[in-house]
Image (cartoon, rainbow, N blue to C red):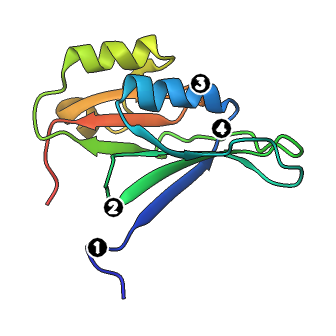
Amino acid sequence: MIDSRTHVRIARPSRDLAAAERFYVGGLGLEVLWRTAERVPGEHDLLMVGPAGGGWHFELTRDPEDPVEPRPTVDDLFVVYLGEPVPEPLVDRLVAAGGTRTAAHNPYWDEYGVTVRDPDGYPLVLCSRTWG
C-alpha cells in the first residue's frame, strides 16, 4: 500500500557524479546516503543523496560503459519547499558548487522561489512556500 510512509527514490543520469555531489551535498546541504565504492564492470556508478532519515532520496547514475546523456527539459523540476524566503547564501553556495541561476520556464516558480540548474542542466527550484 502506498501511503505517507512509503519511501520514494528519484533517479536520473549524470555526466559527472563528483560534480553532482558538490552541487547537491556541498551546495544544497543533502547528505551522501550511499555511493558505489569501486568500479564494477557491467554495473552503474551510483550516488544517492537526501536528508538523513528522510522518506525520499535522490539517485544519480552513470554507466561508464554506455553513458546516458542527461536531457533535461524546462519542466524536469526538483522542487524543495523551504517554507521561508530563499536564503541568498544558499543560492550563492549552489552557484559556487557548479550551479547556474536561471529564470524559470513557468513564472510561478520565479514568483515563489529561485531556480538553479545543476551541473547536468536540470532545474532545482527552491520554493519559499510550504507543501501540504
The disc label shown at residue 19, or none: 3
Residue 27 screen position, x and y as percent:
39, 23
Q: Where does label 2 land, which residue?
A: 55
**Badges 4 and 1: C-beta atoms under 8 Å apart?**
no
Location of residue 109 by image quarter? top left
Real-space Cα distance between discs 3 and 4? 9 Å
Real-space Cα distance between discs 4 and 2? 22 Å
**Badges 3 and 4: C-beta atoms under 8 Å apart?**
yes
Residue at 43%, 11% (x, y): give it.
96
Q: The N terminus lies in which quarter of the figure? A: bottom left
- Taking the view exactly as shown, the residue that stands out farthest to the bottom is 1
Left/right placement of residue 117 relative to residue 69 reads: left
Going from the N terminus, do you reach mark 1 or mark 2 first?
Answer: 1
Kind of residue at badge 1: Arg
Going from the N terminus, do you reach mark 3 or mark 4 first?
Answer: 4
Mark 3 residue element? helix
Residue at 42%, 23% (x, y): give it.
26
Q: Where does label 4 land, which residue?
A: 14
Real-space Cα distance between discs 1 and 2? 7 Å
Residue at 25%, 73% (x, y): give it.
4
Going from the N terminus, do you reach mark 3 or mark 1 first?
Answer: 1
State whether residue 83 is above or below residue 114: below
Residue 21 screen position, x and y as percent:
53, 30
